[in-house]
Amino acid sequence: MLPGAHRQVHERAGGRWAIYWYASRGGAQIARFEGATLAEAEDAELKGAADIAGAYAEERKPRAPIGTVARAIGAFLGSAEWAAMSKATQRGWRRWLDAVREKWGGLSGKDFASDETAAEIRVWRDELALTSPAQADKAMEAVSRFCSYARQRSVKLLPRDCNPTEDIKKAYVRPVQLPPGRAAVLDAIAALPDLASAACDIAHNSGLRCSDLVRLSDTHIDEEAGIVRLGTTKGRRKRRVVAIRLTPPLLAAIRRAQAIRDALYERKRTRARYDRKSPPVKPLTVLVNRSCLPFTPNGLYQHIKSAFDAAGRERIAPHGFRRAAATQRFKSGLSWAQIGRELGWGESEAETMGAVYVPDEAIG
């Protein structure tokens, strides 16, 4: 039984039947079932009984009072600002926003902005940092972004200067990641099987991300201009076109991969002719798997990983080759702006990204 719920049965045009469920009389519709006959509609209704109960419970759930933190968090989760965030960010922040709503959801904006609440948030953060410093930082990022939303004039929950996380330093300090040395990279490339070796060779000489490596095709290579030009896939707002110098080592690596691709295609075409099947379409991407199909980013990552394991070598991730490429470019005398244009960094962030990719320890 669903107290207060309202059920309506209608015969629609064409003789079809529909059953509607509402959370209350005159309230929001929570379910609808149709059928060619009334019996079919009732059968669909019976199968969807659990959906009706779930939608009813969600609709009748008590709503937080206006002017409280819980109500503002609910509005934030339903805002266009939240919808514009990536799914990964939403997953990472949702649990911490739910925790804030559970701990301080009943507070007004004035009480949430008080020094006492700020002190409680710091204690909460310190407790999280004991077990997971990185997650403690994620929690503070979520709180800070919510406060930024709640300070907007359209929301007016918090004072303009309220940010309980303002003076809280990061709990997690990422260890310095040194790029692999040139000798280690060349040694690994020489030891890997042909397909993985060619992929790593291109990654090392181009500096492309794994997601861009799998998209690299013949149409991106301009030998006359001496440039490899393609759009990057990094982020929805940061997509840029990179122009990479087509150096002799990079051109040799690309031609090696193309030769492997062409050999795999010829074998596949011969097999199709023998089996009296239609000839396969030749892929334009430079890198293909053993079935002569374009790699997916994860497929290329796993292929390289397996190749390192099979060769008994210490793994170098595809992004490690990108770090090595940045280091080699810096040591050759290129400016951060030039390196940024080849690796897809913006002008304003090139020097900052360079400090991350090429730490002082790597320069020697």
Image (tube, grey):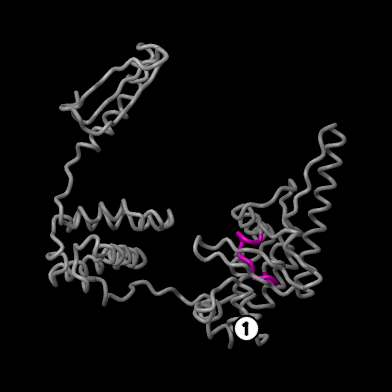
Disc 1 on helix, strand or loop? helix
Give the quadrant of residue 247.
Answer: bottom right
Residue 277 placement, left or right of 100: right
Q: What is the magenta segment's predominant secondary structure?
A: helix
For the residue marked with disc 1, what is the amino acid?
A: Phe
Instruction: Identify which residue is drawn at 78% across, 73% down.
Output: 225
User: Viewer-proximal residue, 301 or 147?
Assistant: 147
Q: Relative to 152, say whether 275 is above or below.
A: above
Q: What quarter of the picture does the N terminus occupy?
A: top left
Q: What quarter of the picture does the C terminus occupy?
A: bottom right
Residue 150: x %, y % from top left: 24, 63
On whether residue 331 falls in the magenta region, the answer is: no
On whether residue 207 falls in the magenta region, the answer is: yes
Residue 65 placement, left or right of 127: left
Residue 214: x %, y % from top left: 66, 57
Residue at mark 1: 330
Instruction: Identify which residue is drawn at 72% across, 53% down.
Output: 288
Magenta segment = 204-213
**Label 1 crowd bin: few (<14), some (14–19), many (20+), radius 10 Å:** some
Residue 22 placement, left or right of 174: left
Residue 208: x %, y % from top left: 64, 67
User: Viewer-proximal residue, 68 or 26?
Assistant: 26
Q: How many marks?
A: 1
